[in-house]
Amino acid sequence: KEIENSNISNTERLVELFDQYEVLDAMNSLRIVRGRFYAIQKFEQLIEEGESDLKDLHGFVSDNPWLIDPRWDYLDEELEIKDEIELNFNNIEQESRVGFISLGDSDTLRLVDIRKTDYILQKSDLDQFKDYVDYLRSIKNMEPVSGRDVEGYMIAQGLADTRAVENEVRRMKMDDMRIRTYDEIKDIARRSHKAFLDVFERKAERTDSDMLQTYLTESEQLGLDEFGLKS
């Protein structure tokens, strides 16, 4: 409000106000980063616990889709997509499968197949998943897909070391179906976290904000800075 009411001829005051706004915005963003720091720690704990917390793992990924891709900030889970697959396929329940989540926005629907933390994907798993994605694409102009593009993601410990699997993964990637290992997800989350902190450190230096620097120092004391560097 003060920016709107400021005299535009007072350049120094405008710069000061913009700096203040940028600091406040950075402070709010840092609170989100701190929350994600704890979320990543919880995610890694669930992976380590493996079998004991599979339902918690499924729910946690559903609540924090940015773990799979940092750009997935505000995606809603669409339970009717899972219902649609279960209605049309009879091989949904498998010992290796933790569960599906389906995340959508106005343009794209993302089907995510979460496998157990120690599971190695086989060629048959890839073929089955392609059937699910292809089916959703075949009903693109009907509910619940509603004209959106469909992407696929599978999460597991890793892939079988065979030429057939390697070739299929390459083809799937070209068709917007990707594999994420749990280690890759942890690495992506940590690198994204570190990139955020680097931005805030530059802002603190440029704006010379004691408040922002204090908050960054507190974050360092919590281990947020070293956390992003952990392998």
Image (cartoon, grey):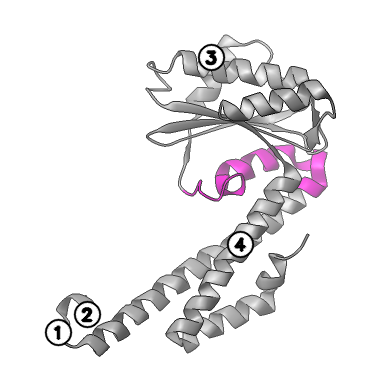
Q: Earlier in the sequence, mark 2 or mark 4?
A: 2
Q: Residue at x 62, y 76 (%)?
A: 219
Q: Are marks 2 and 4 in contact (CB under 8 Å)?
A: no
Is residue 59 shown in magenta? Answer: yes
The span shown in magenta is 47-73
- Mark 4: give few (<14), some (14-19) or many (20+) Cα within 10 Å: many
| Image quadrant occupied by the C terminus | bottom right
Q: Earlier in the sequence, mark 3 or mark 2?
A: 2
Tag 2 residue: 2
Which numbered mark, 2 or 1, is in the foreground of this view?
1
Q: Residue at x 52, y 68 (%)?
A: 31
Q: Earlier in the sequence, mark 3 or mark 1?
A: 1
Q: Quadrant of residue 178?
A: top right
Left/right placement of residue 164 relative to residue 200 reads: right
Q: Residue at x 83, y 37 (%)?
A: 118
Q: Residue 16: percent from the left, percent from the top?
A: 31, 86
What's under tag 1, amino acid-wise? Asn
Tag 1 residue: 7
Tag 4 residue: 193
Q: Earlier in the sequence, mark 1 or mark 4?
A: 1
Disc 1 is placed on an element classified as loop
Q: In the displayed structure, would residue 121 be above or below residue 9?
A: above
What's under tag 4, amino acid-wise? His
- Mark 2: give few (<14), some (14-19) or many (20+) Cα within 10 Å: few
